[in-house]
Image: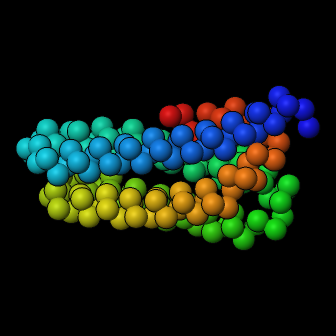
Amino acid sequence: MTERETTRLVAWSQELRRVHGRLREALSMTRASLADGTPGESATRELLLYCHGFCTALDSHHQGEDRTLFPAIAAAHPELRPVLRSLEQDHSMIAHLLGSLRDAVERAAPPEELDHHLEGIAAIMENHFRYEERQLLTVLETVELAAAPGEVLGPL
């Protein structure tokens, strides 16, 4: 493997960490904004914008992993298939939680309910990200991927 290929593969693991960091930050800022108690319609509008942006970004991130990254890892490291299945199940659960949040936002649920949804997403997302990073960062430094990071990890 050339030095250029090694550098590119290490960049994949670093990019995954950066994407996870941006998603964590977006969720944290949204929860803080909700806690500030922005009144009524304005808070709902902000949360709708957040949900459109963040929820779409997180969905895209997971779809890219499921479609491109995980099959490449499974081909190179078949022993990781159980890990990948577990991560895909997390993706499905997170998608369901995001759908529930969207529904709550669209019906203008009270702030306590919205925060409950955000808290659930935060807990599952953080657990998922930590597990994924523990299991896959080193592997990402050895997997051959022809796709661009934005295609695989989401357009953040």
Residue in the picture at 61% in, 33% down = 150
Furthest residue in direction top, as rendered: 4
Task: Give the tally of numbered discs.
Answer: 0
Furthest residue in direction right, as rendered: 1
Residue 13 in the image: state x and y as whole percent: 66, 44
Color style of the picture: rainbow
The N terminus, quarter of image? top right
Q: Along the horizontal axis of the image, is 154 left or right of 140?
A: left
Residue in the picture at 23% in, 39% down = 46
Q: Quadrant of residue 60?
A: top right
Q: Is residue 82 visible?
A: yes
Q: Against 75, is 57 above or below?
A: above
Residue in the picture at 13% in, 47% down = 36
Residue 26 in the image: state x and y as whole percent: 37, 43
Q: Against 69, is 87 above or below?
A: below
Residue in the picture at 35% in, 48% down = 27
The foreground one among 145 and 64 is 145
Q: Along the horizontal axis of the image, is 131 left or right of 113?
A: right
Furthest residue in direction front, as rendered: 3
Q: Along the horizontal axis of the image, is 28 left or right of 63?
A: left
Q: Is residue 106 visible?
A: no
The foreground one among 97 and 78 is 78
Q: Quadrant of residue 135?
A: bottom right
Residue 88 in the image: state x and y as whole percent: 62, 62
